[in-house]
Image: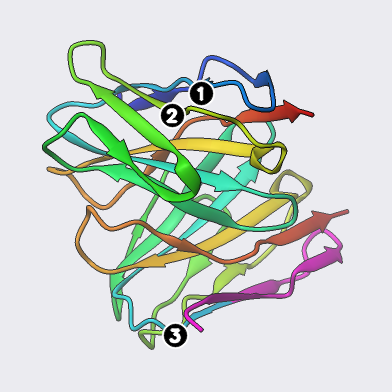
Amino acid sequence: EAQVTQNPRYLITVTGKKLTVTCSQNMNHEYMSWYRQDPGLGLRQIYYSMNVEVTDKGDVPEGYKVSRKEKRNFPLILESPSPNQTSLYFCASSRKDSNQPQHFGDGTRLSIL
Amino acid sequence: AQSVAQPEDQVNVAEGNPLTVKCTYSVSGNPYLFWYVQYPNRGLQFLLKYITGDNLVKGSYGFEAEFNKSQTSFHLKKPSALVSDSALYFCAVRDRDSSYKLIFGSGTRLLVRP
C-alpha cells in the first residue's frame, strides 16, 4: 500500500530536549515536505526537498532542521524545542512535477512543555 | 505576496442539499489549484486539482470545483451533500513558475446535518 509514515504519532516533551520526527514514503517520490498545522492558520510549510541532498526553506523554518540522505526518508529535527513549536505536524511526498498532488502522513502531534 | 483565502470558517448544510466551499487566491501567473479534505486524526487527502483546460474539474467522492480566472476563485461544490462529507477542507495553490512551494488556505469546516 502506498503510504507516508510518520513516527511518533504523539509526543509530549520538555523545552530544550532534542527530538526527531521520522517520515518515510514507499512511492519513490522525489519531492517531500514538512508542514505544521495550527488552528486558523491552515498548513504552513517548514522545509521541503526536491531530491536526495537537496533541501530548501519553507515559510516557517526557524527552529527546525531536516536532512534527505535517502530518497524515502525525510526526518524533521527540533534541536532545542520550545513551547511555540507545539503543533500538529504533517509530512508529505509527491512526484517531482509541480502539478502533482501530495500524499500526506497521518500527522504527529507534538506538545512542548 | 502569494495567498489563499477561505472566507468561511464553517459551512453548514442539510444532507441532500448542494454545498459550496469558497476559495480565492492571489498568485502571480497561472497557478495549479488543489482541494484536500481532512478527517479527524488523519492526514490530508487529495480531492481534485486544476491544471488547465475545462474550468469545471471533477474529483473524488462526487466533488467538483469551478475555476474562475477573472475572479481568481476555485470553489468546491457538490450537488448533494452527505453526512459523511463532514470534515475540514483545504484549498491550496502552487505557482507553476516558481519553486515547489504549496500555499494552503486556513481551512473550512463542513458540517452536514442529517
Q: Left or right of A22: which side holds A39?
A: right
Quadrant including the N terminus of chain B: top left
Return the residue nearer the eye: A21 or B83: B83
Residue at the farthest top position:
B71
Q: CA distance from mark 3 to mark 1?
A: 33 Å
Which residue is depicted at the point 28% across and 37% down? Answer: B57
Q: Nearer the viewer, mark 2 or mark 3?
A: 2
**Which residue occupies 50% across, 48% down?**
B61
- Amino acid found under the numbered disc labelled 3: Asn
Q: Secondary structure at mark 3?
A: loop
Q: Which residues are magenta?
A: A1-22
Residue A60, visible in the rendered structure: no
The disc, 2 or 1, on the residue closer to the chain's N-terminal end is 1
Q: Which residue is mark 2?
A: B76
Q: Is A22 located above or below residue B56 in the figure? A: below
Instruction: Say whether marks 2 and 1 touch (CB < 8 Å).
Output: yes
Q: Chain of mark 2?
A: B
Say whether residue B39 is left or right of residue B19: right
**Residue bearing mark 3:** A26
Give the labeled residue for mark 1: B21
Amino acid marked by disc 1: Val
| Secondary structure of the residue carrying numbered label 2 | strand
**Residue A61 in sight here:** yes
